[in-house]
């Protein structure tokens, strides 16, 4: 096995999409890295919604918890606490200016225990995005509270994801 | 094939900055920058990061917006660091007497139609205590960047900087 970080799956949007999914998480790697970049929207403020997938299907039950701190330039930092949500809502890309904006939303996350049927899937992320009032940079952790195998990630916005978004999944080699 | 590839590594001895020039290209969209080293002195000092433009000039205008949290092992509350229209990604790392290091993701710097954005996490030894700083920032102008300058505000340090491309 080669050492380093190996790309497992990637989607680059060539048209507006309501959902992007990347998959291929299995027993080959213990830890995976997710990178979401180049996110823009049609309209203004929107929230990025991240979910785990099981057999390629996004899981929408009320099993998502999140804790984090919303670093921002426009006001005091925001404590982010979500219990029993249907998604990780503040994980990355809080909101963006419209599709003509040159400010793109980006985040990088690490995925733990996704392929473990006896453990909850967990995630850490650092994000950067822009909205009308300034820069948002939440640092977050999340847990999906179902002990099952999750094989990927679903990413949606409250409006469509525009052309040029890139979502990549990497495996971190063990040896 | 490894999806994270070393592009350039530079080491400077008793320097105040390192220039990582001509490291961004169309081959990669996003990058990782790492920095580590050792301070040659005992001043309060920080590392500020600036982009380098297509003419190999360091971008020094007030075009950098950042938000960061200064987390301290010795005191609370943590400090909210917000800088608008600054001349760098300010206080990417903060230390005294000893150096620390940081890891930074740089998103789409070579795209002339995009505002370069970054996230980073640093650690610095502050008089036998510790300061850690997560940071997120944008360059306020949409222009192509070809490299980065890692600038140290103390007198001297030994510093290593590296840039990796993410396929």
Image (cartoon, coloured by chain):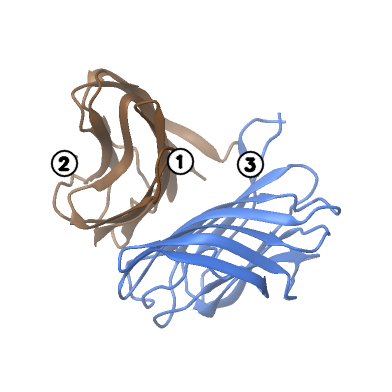
Q: Secondary structure at mark 1?
A: strand
Residue A64's x, y, as percent? 68, 68
Q: Is residue A126 left or right of residue B35?
A: right
**Residue B108 in the image: above or below residue B97:** below
Q: Residue furthest left?
A: B61
Residue A52's x, y, as percent? 70, 64
Q: Colour of chain A?
A: blue
| Residue position marked by numbered label 2 in the rendering | B57
Asked where in the image residue B49 lies, by quadrant, the reply is top left
Q: Given the image, what chain letter belongs to the residue carrying mark 1?
A: B
| Residue position marked by numbered label 1 in the rendering | B165
**Residue A173 in the image: above or below residue B11:** below
> Same chain for the residues at labels 1 and 2, yes or no?
yes
Q: Disc number at residue A145?
A: none
In 3D space, how far apart are the residues under numbered discs 1 and 2 (Cα atoms)?
A: 21 Å
Q: Secondary structure at mark 2?
A: loop
Q: Given the image, what chain letter belongs to the residue carrying mark 2?
A: B
| Residue position marked by numbered label 3 in the rendering | A6
Binning the other alpha carbons within 10 Å of mark 2 as few (below 14), some (14 to 19) or many (20 upward) gives some
């Amino acid at each position: 096995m080669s050492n380093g970080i190996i790309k497992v799956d990637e989607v680059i949007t060539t048209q507006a999409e309501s959902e992007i999914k990347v998959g291929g998480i299995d027993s080959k790697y213990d830890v995976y890295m997710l990178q979401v970049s180049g996110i823009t929207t049609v309209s203004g403020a929107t929230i990025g919604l991240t979910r785990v997938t099981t057999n390629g299907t996004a899981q929408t039950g009320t099993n998502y918890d999140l804790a984090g701190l919303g670093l921002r330039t426009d006001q005091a930092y925001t404590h982010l606490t979500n219990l029993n949500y249907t998604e990780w809502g503040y994980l990355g890309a809080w909101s963006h200016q419209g599709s003509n904006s040159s400010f793109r939303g980006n985040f990088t996350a690490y995925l733990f225990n996704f392929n473990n049927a006896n453990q909850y899937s967990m995630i850490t992320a650092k994000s950067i995005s822009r909205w009308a009032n300034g820069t948002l940079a939440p640092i977050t952790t999340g847990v999906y509270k179902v002990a099952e195998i999750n094989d990927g990630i679903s990413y949606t916005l409250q409006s469509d994801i525009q052309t040029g978004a890139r979502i990549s999944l990497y495996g971190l080699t063990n040896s | 094939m490894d999806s994270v590839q070393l592009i350039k590594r530079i080491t400077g001895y008793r320097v105040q900055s390192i220039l990582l020039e001509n490291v961004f290209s169309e081959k990669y969209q996003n990058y990782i920058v790492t920095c580590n080293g050792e301070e040659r002195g005992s001043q309060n000092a920080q590392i500020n990061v600036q982009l380098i433009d297509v003419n190999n000039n360091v971008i020094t205008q007030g075009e950098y917006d950042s938000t960061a949290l200064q987390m301290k092992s010795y005191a609370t509350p943590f400090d909210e660091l917000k800088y608008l229209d600054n001349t760098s990604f300010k206080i990417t790392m903060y230390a005294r007497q000893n150096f620390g290091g940081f890891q930074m993701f740089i998103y789409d710097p070579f795209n002339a139609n995009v505002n370069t954005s970054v996230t980073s996490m640093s650690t610095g030894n502050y008089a036998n205590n510790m300061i850690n700083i997560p940071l997120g920032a944008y360059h306020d102008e949409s222009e192509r960047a070809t490299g980065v300058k890692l600038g140290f505000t103390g007198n001297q340090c030994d510093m290593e900087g590296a840039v990796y491309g993410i396929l």
